[in-house]
Image (cartoon, rainbow, N blue to C red):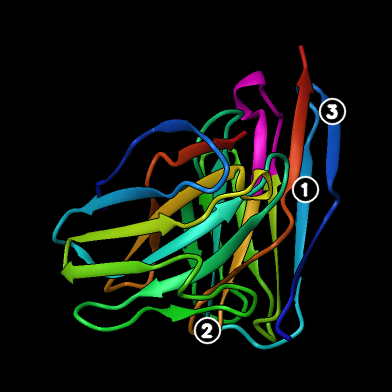
Amino acid sequence: SAVISQKPSRDICQRGTSLTIQCQVDSQVTMMFWYRQQPGQSLTLIATANQGSEATYESGFVIDKFPISRPNLTFSTLTVSNMSPEDSSIYLCSGMTDKETQYFGPGTRLLVL
Amino acid sequence: GQQVMQIPQYQHVQEGEDFTTYCNSSTTLSNIQWYKQRPGGHPVFLIQLVKSGEVKKQKRLTFQFGEAKKNSSLHITATQTTDVGTYFCAGNTGKLIFGQGTTLQVKP
């Protein structure tokens, strides 16, 4: 299985500020993704992080709000910009292996006041 | 758009009883994956099913993939308190589409 780490594990932020979440994966991962999970809800795909190019965003998510970088195969960042209380959620990074199985990081619990 | 429906949303069982959760996709899947998420934890990969009609077992867990590759089920025999959590199916159509999850509570 792939090993995926994320930081910070949690944060409390003021509205209007931005937070950058970092994700580090091991070398078995070919693709990286960012998800959001509201408490008690399922996972919603935000975007696919593409190495060296712009991320591919899902419907309802835009680059200005959730800029994503992936400068190399094993590292990606997600920024939650100009935060509002509605952005309070768990943000999860995941990596897909060449066998198309996905493994998730421990998540970042974000609370926006 | 593509959807994966999962039922039931919640299930309470007595320890020792069986449990089943069902997934149904609106489109044919290349594969389906199952995850378990403990309270306060992150989704943990359980298994991937690829072939039409495939059945896989992990101890007390039995996973099935339908003949049309549009539905799947997870069955737990003789539940234990350690089985508590939310079970998600995720259909792969080029990207993973997650079902709503089934939260299992087990009374000791």
Judge by depth and name the residue closer to the eye, B51 or A71.
Answer: A71
For disc 1, the neighbor class at 10 Å (few under 14, some 14 to 19, many from 20) is some
Q: Which residue is mark 2?
A: B30
Tell me if A88 is positioned left or right of A70 in this view.
right
**Numbered disc in front, either 1 or 2:** 2
Q: Residue at x 40, y 66 (%)?
A: A33
The quarter of the image holding the C terminus of chain B is top right
In the image, which residues are magenta? B76-87
For disc 2, the neighbor class at 10 Å (few under 14, some 14 to 19, many from 20) is some
Residue A32 position within the rendered picture, expressed as x and y whole percent measured from the top left: 33, 67
Q: State whether residue A32 is above or below residue A22.
A: below
Respond whether the residues carrying marks 1 and 2 are from the same subunit: yes
Element marked by disc 1: strand
- Give me the C-alpha separation between circle 1 and circle 2: 22 Å
Residue A82 position within the rendered picture, expressed as x and y whole percent measured from the top left: 52, 55
As for residue B80 lying within the magenta part, the answer is yes
Q: Residue at x 23, y 69 (%)?
A: A70
